[in-house]
Image (spheres, rainbow, N blue to C red):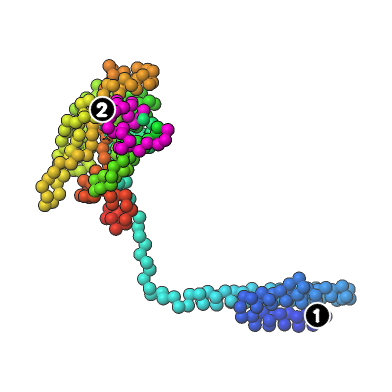
Amino acid sequence: MTDNIQSIQNEAVAGINAANDERSLEEARVAFLGKKGTLASASAGMKDVAKEDKPAFGAALNKARNAITQALETKTKELQILADKKSVAGIDLTLPPRELAAGGLHPLTIIKDRAIQILRRMGFALADGPEIETEYHCFDALNTPHDHPARNEKDTFYFDGGKLLRTHTSSVQIRTMENNTPPVRIIAPGSAYRRDDVDATHLPVFNQLEGLYVDQDVKLGDLKGTLEYFLQAMFGDDTEVRFRPHFFPFTEPSFEIDVKLKIDGQEPKWIEVAGCGMVDPAVFSSISSQRGDQAFNPESITGYAFGMGLDRLAMIQWGIKDIRPLIENDTRFLQQFS
Ligand code: DAH
């Protein structure tokens, strides 16, 4: 009986060693070790073995199982190594790899982050508001009358039901004053939307950075000093800045701010970067009646506000003449900035 087992073992090990692919190896495993395999039927013979021979028979069975399992493992590894070798055969290890492109920040992100960093150092906190706004927050509360051209359907994206895509970040001024009491000193970067036709200087979506400072005794000189300091921190200490009288419904007096752009080989020219002014008392009155308290009573507080075009700042910073590449995601353009 034990001789028989020895010959099963020999046959199995020889069969396994002869297998030359995974499939024939699996067939050999099933034939010898499987439930209906040779070894299983041999162990079934245990019941016919004389009692005193049972231990020797059992030991022979174990030895055979171990030897067959061992042979299977060895062969499996061998076949794996062969398969691995085959799969890399023909690969040219001297071929240089494809270059890995490093990511970088978008120029608008770079400008926005720098602007935020400078203004935060000056004590402004970050604020935000929704891009889908009410007419109240975008216009009415900002002292903009119903017949103002900015409210025209030709200029503003309206939703059914009266909401709109904010036409400027100035709506965040209102949202901030609804929920805070003076002193308020915030900046709010974000997108704004207008129904403009696309050309080199206009996009229907663009980026602004709003600022608002409300406290006792805020003066025009504070506004001027703050924005001059900011623009010189952005573009260099020798940057020339000028304030031109203008009109905005929510500030009085109001100004547009220009910086002098000097590009080598070109006549320097003034470029508009922001609107600003002293918050119109009418805005404070409207907020006060909305809040139902005296926190923004125009008799006791004053404030200034400004809103600048971040796309404009980026165009000035890098001498970009066309605004469109800023939203086109062409890496040939974008990689110049990272
Ligand atoms: N909201 C104005 C615009 O989009 C810009 C602006 C002007 C913002 C004057 C202000 C401001 O806060 O005081 O054209």
Percent from the top left, x then y, of residue 31? 72, 76
Q: What's the residue at 19%, 36% (across, down)?
A: 257
Which residues are the magenta region? 136-161
Percent from the top left, x then y, of residue 266? 12, 50
Quarter holding residue 258: top left
Q: What's the residue at 35%, 26% (across, down)?
A: 177
At label 2, which amino acid type do we have? Pro
Percent from the top left, x then y, of residue 58? 80, 73
Q: In the image, is residue 59 above or below residue 222?
A: below
Instruction: Tell me which image quadrant ligand 1 sits in.
Output: top left
Queried whether the magenta region covers residue 216, the answer comes back as no
Quarter holding residue 241: top left
In depth, the one of 36 and 269 nearer the eye is 269
Q: Is residue 207 left or right of residue 80?
A: left
Q: Is mark 2 on a helix, strand or loop?
A: loop
In depth, the one of 281 and 318 nearer the eye is 281
- Ligand 1 within 8 Å of disc 1? The answer is no
Dot 2 or dot 1: first in sequence order is 1
**Magenta-colored segment: predominant secondary structure:** loop
- Which mark's residue is nearer the viewer, 2 or 1? 2
Q: Pointer 2: residues within 10 angstroms few (<14), some, or many (20+)?
A: some
Quarter holding residue 20: bottom right
Queried whether the magenta region covers residue 144, the answer comes back as yes
At label 1, which amino acid type do we have? Thr
Q: Can residue 150 be seen in this view?
A: yes
Specify the quadrant that holds the N terminus. Answer: bottom right
Q: Is mark 1 on a helix, strand or loop?
A: helix
Q: How far apart are marks 2 and 1 (CA)?
A: 106 Å
The label shown at residue 309 is: none
Percent from the top left, x then y, of residue 223? 22, 30
Residue tagged 1: 2
Residue tagged 2: 249
